[in-house]
Image: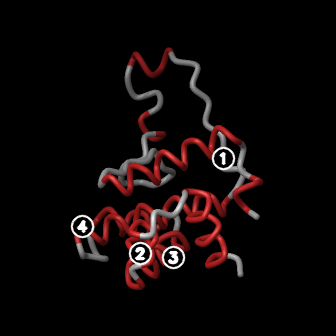
Amino acid sequence: MIWNSIPRPWQVCLEEAWTAYCAGSLRYAAREPFAGSINLLGTTPYLCRKPIQIFGLADTALEILVTALAVARDLFYRCNANNIVIQAWREVIPSGVVVGEQLHQAGTLRQMQAEGCTAEHLFESISEIISP
């Protein structure tokens, strides 16, 4: 089960993200070119002085899951798979975009929200889609 392999601090973060999704607001720092911030490191005197280190993701399944959630949410509100945000995500995390589009088209997240499912159930269900 993917949920049990996620460190507890990330579980808490994902539980909060799911709560935010259900409340109607969702924002992520991501490894994508549109809103990702790592390209800003070293560009200002302030950021040049900070000992910020960037590490790659240890779990690509988690990145796909988080991206899929963001894509599905964006599609719900904008209804446009060709918007610049999703296109930017598609370039870097194509699997996440595909899963997000599937979730949106099937209405999966709205159904799970209506059923009051937990973040754990949500992520376990989506993980079955990406690695059956």
Badge 3 amino acid: Val
Answer whether labels 1 and 3 touch (C-beta < 8 Å). Answer: no
Residue 35: % across, % down: 37, 49
Mark 2 or 3, which is nearer the eye?
2
Q: Residue furthest left?
A: 78
Rate crowding at label 4 as few (under 14), some (14 to 19) or many (20 or more) other CA atoms within 10 Å: few
Q: Which mark, by number, is residue 129?
A: none
Closer to the N terminus: mark 4 or mark 3?
A: 4
Q: Which mark, by number, is residue 111?
A: 2
- From mark 1 to mark 2, how far is it between C-alphas? 33 Å
Q: Which residue is mark 1?
A: 56
Residue at the image point whose x is 53% and y is 48% from the top? 15
Rate crowding at label 2 as few (under 14), some (14 to 19) or many (20 or more) other CA atoms within 10 Å: few
Closer to the N terminus: mark 4 or mark 2?
A: 4
Which element carries disc 2, helix, strand or loop?
helix
Mark 1 or 2, which is nearer the eye?
2
Badge 4 amino acid: Tyr
Which element carries disc 1, helix, strand or loop?
loop
Q: Which residue is mark 3?
A: 99
Q: Which mark, by number, is residue 77?
A: 4
Closer to the N terminus: mark 4 or mark 1?
A: 1
Q: Residue furthest bottom?
A: 106
Badge 2 amino acid: Gln
Residue 87 placement: quadrant: bottom left
Q: Residue furthest front?
A: 115
- From mark 4 to mark 2, how far is it between C-alphas? 16 Å
Choose between 119 and 126: the one closer to the eye.
119
